[in-house]
Amino acid sequence: MSKAARRLEHRRARRADDGSMTVVVVASLGVIGLALVAALAVTSAVIAAHRARASADLGALAGAIEVARGADPAVACVRSAQVVRRNAATMSGCRVEPDGSVVVVVSASVSWTLPAAGPLTAKARARAGPSP
């Protein structure tokens, strides 16, 4: 094979590869984008879970303080609901046990989810009061 023929063959081989890195880069960026979206969704769910737990703890403590002061159980639950609301959560249950402890059930919405997942909530339960 002559030198000119080899050069022509080499050029043809190079042209077959033209643009292949573009496909690799675009695919890599897509994978990185999906990983970032998934990380954002997981982080948002973890934050909501922490917010729900903290709200439940603080709400139960507020209710237990009211009970210890001699307040009616309904007043204790109202106070618990106020504290839970201030912590960006929703109280779905509150009860005062016979021993004077307060049990609070709370949910906090996940601020960012994947569109296919729909709205998600994190739930938590806390008890505060005298030791059983």
Image: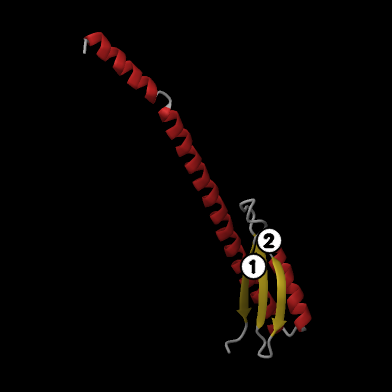
Give residue 132's mark.
none
Residue 100, percent from left and from top: 67, 87
Number of numbered callouts drawn? 2
At mark 1, the secondary structure is helix
Residue type marked 2:
Ala
Give the left or right position of residue 33, taking residue 69 as reference: left
Quarter in which the C terminus is drawn? bottom right
Decide which of 24, 49 is in the foreground and name it: 24
Mark 2 and mark 1: Cα distance apart in space: 8 Å
Residue bearing the label numbered 2: 88
Q: Quadrant of residue 60?
A: bottom right
The amino acid at mark 1 is Ser
Asked if disc 2 and disc 1 are in contact, CB closer than 8 Å, the reply is yes
Q: Residue 87 location in percent, x, y?
A: 67, 63
Q: Position of residue 11 (x, y in %)?
A: 33, 16
- In the image, residue 56 above or below residue 20: below
Q: Which residue is mark 1?
A: 55
Of 124 and 19, the residue lying toward us: 19
Circle 2 crowding by C-alpha within 10 Å: few under 14, some 14–19, many from 20: some
Identify the residue at horizontal 57%, vertical 64% (top origin): 50
The vertical placement of 66 against 132, above or below, is above
Q: Quadrant of residue 69?
A: bottom right
* Disc on the earlier residue, 2 or 1: 1
Name which residue lies at 62% across and 80% down: 128
Q: Residue at x 68, y 84 (%)?
A: 68
Q: Is residue 131 left or right of residue 95?
A: left
